[in-house]
């Protein structure tokens, strides 16, 4: 994105109502893989989560830095 900030987003395959916890774990795993390449850790800049609902999948987007 800008100033060393990266973004990962994922749509949840979860059916029914509730938070997209599986997608949240997936975006953090991907961010950690990215930062581990340079022996750094993920620092969350912004985390947006939208719960799944009737015929609507949940979404997660993570903006992060490697430090």
Image (cartoon, helix red, strand yellow):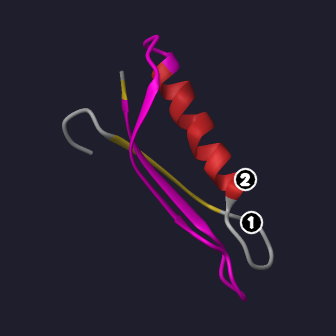
Q: How far is the residue under mark 1 from the one under mark 2? A: 9 Å
Q: Are marks 1 and 2 in contact (CB under 8 Å)?
A: yes
| Relative to 35, 6 lies left or right | left
Residue occupying the point 65% across, 45% down: 26
Residue 22's label in the rendered image is 2
Q: Residues within 10 Å of mark 1 (few under 14, many from 20)?
A: some
Expressed as whole percent of the image width and height from the top left, the position of residue 10 reads: 58, 57
Task: Residue lying at the far top in this picture: please name it.
Answer: 39
In this rendered view, identify the residue nearer to me: 17 or 15: 17
| 7 in magenta | no
Q: Earlier in the sequence, mark 1 or mark 2?
A: 1
Question: Is residue 57 on the magenta stretch?
Answer: yes
Judging depth in this view, the residue of 37 and 23 nearest the camera is 23
Q: Which residue carries the number 1 mark?
A: 13
Q: Residue at x 46, y 21 (%)?
A: 41
Please state the horizontal and vertical placement of residue 57, each as a whole percent of the image. Answer: 66, 75
State the extent of the magenta-drawn residues as a range: 36-65
Reply above or below: 29 against 38: below
Q: Nearer the viewer, mark 1 or mark 2?
A: 2
User: Which residue is found at the position 36% from the left and 21% from the top?
Assistant: 67
**Label total for image:** 2
Question: Label 2 crowding class (10 Å Cα cut-off): few <14, some 14-19, many 20+?
Answer: some
Q: Secondary structure at mark 2?
A: helix
Q: Is residue 44 left or right of residue 18?
A: left
Residue 25: x, y in percent?
A: 66, 45
Q: Residue furthest bottom?
A: 54
Placement of 37 over or under 47, stated as above or below: above
Q: Is residue 3 left or right of residue 58?
A: left
Find numbered disc 1 in the image and state the secondary structure of the residue it sits on: loop
Q: Could you tell me which residue is drawn at 26 percent across and 32 percent down?
A: 4
């Amino acid at each position: 994105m800008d100033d060393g900030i990266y973004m990962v987003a994922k749509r949840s395959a979860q059916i029914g109502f509730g938070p997209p916890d599986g997608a949240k774990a997936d975006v953090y795993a991907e961010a950690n893989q990215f930062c581990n390449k340079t022996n750094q850790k993920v620092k969350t800049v912004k985390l947006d989560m939208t719960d799944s609902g009737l015929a609507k999948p949940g979404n997660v987007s993570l903006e992060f830095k490697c430090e």
